[in-house]
């Protein structure tokens, strides 16, 4: 459990750092933060179909944590005692290029997820065989995914392979590509 909190806090800290005031003029038709895509809106049957546990959903950042520029939702693997957590983050304020510049991530690799240009990366706070991340731009903002080993569990598969599968399976629930 400790590794899960460390990775969540690391991601929250970096995303909070990214959440600086944005200069510019509001654009007609661009939704406000309250209207941005909520990853928890993905139907439970879709979550179960990709092999995640819809009953083990973690909505939001957790008690006492707030990152206003990002919405988030996460699910554990198929069982209550699963070895991993899959988290989805969404923001209308940031881009894939800004994810690429994030110091909490490393070992960037351009990939395609079911035809979407995407970025795959490691989490600097965890070993490469314990965590993976992916991200892609949409017409409404950027979506980012992380998959991290929980607690003292040993990985029982390749985190990058699993995150690719879950991301592709759930792809139709995200805003369309640019």
Image (tube, rainbow, N blue to C red):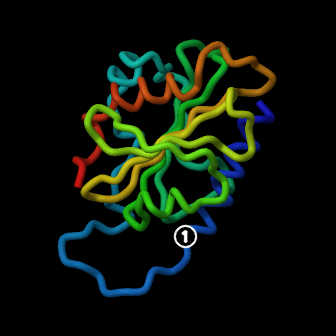
Residue 143 location (% of width, % of height): 41, 49
Up the image or down, 74 lies above or below 33; here it is: above
- Which residue is drawn at the image coordinates 33% and 23% (left, top)? 46
Residue 148 location (% of width, % of height): 64, 32
Dot 1: element: loop
User: In this orientation, which residue lies closer to the viewer: 33 or 121?
Assistant: 121
User: In this orientation, which residue lies closer to the viewer: 161 or 37?
Assistant: 161
- Which residue is drawn at the image coordinates 71% and 47% (left, top)? 124
In which quarter of the view is residue 96 placed? bottom left
Q: Number of callouts in the render? A: 1
Q: Is residue 64 left or right of residue 56?
A: right
Q: Is residue 76 left or right of residue 115?
A: right
Up the image or down, 81 lies above or below 102; here it is: above
Label 1 belongs to which residue? 19
- Which residue is drawn at the image coordinates 58% and 12% (left, top)? 79
Residue 38 location (% of width, % of height): 38, 48
Categorize mark 1 by other alpha carbons within 10 Å: few (<14), some (14-19), many (20+): some
Q: Residue furthest left?
A: 29
User: In this orientation, which residue lies closer to the viewer: 155 or 128?
Assistant: 128
Q: Quarter of the image for the C terminus: give it.
A: bottom left
């Amino acid at each position: 459990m400790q590794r899960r909190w460390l990775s969540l806090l690391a991601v929250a800290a970096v995303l909070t750092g990214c959440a600086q005031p944005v200069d510019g003029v509001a654009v007609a038709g661009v939704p406000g933060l309250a209207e941005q895509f909520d990853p928890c809106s993905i139907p439970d049957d879709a979550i179960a179909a990709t092999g995640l546990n819809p009953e083990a959903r973690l909505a939001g950042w957790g008690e006492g944590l707030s990152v206003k520029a990002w919405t988030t939702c996460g699910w554990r693997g198929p069982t209550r005692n699963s070895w991993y957590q899959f988290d989805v983050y969404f923001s209308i304020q940031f881009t894939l290029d800004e994810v690429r510049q994030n110091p909490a991530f490393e070992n960037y690799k351009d990939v395609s997820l079911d035809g979407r240009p995407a970025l795959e990366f490691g989490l600097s706070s965890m070993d490469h065989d314990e965590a993976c991340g992916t991200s892609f731009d949409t017409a409404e903002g950027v979506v980012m995914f992380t998959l991290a080993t929980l607690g003292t569990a040993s990985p029982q598969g390749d985190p990058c392979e699993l995150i690719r599968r879950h991301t592709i399976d759930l792809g139709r629930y995200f805003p369309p590509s640019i």
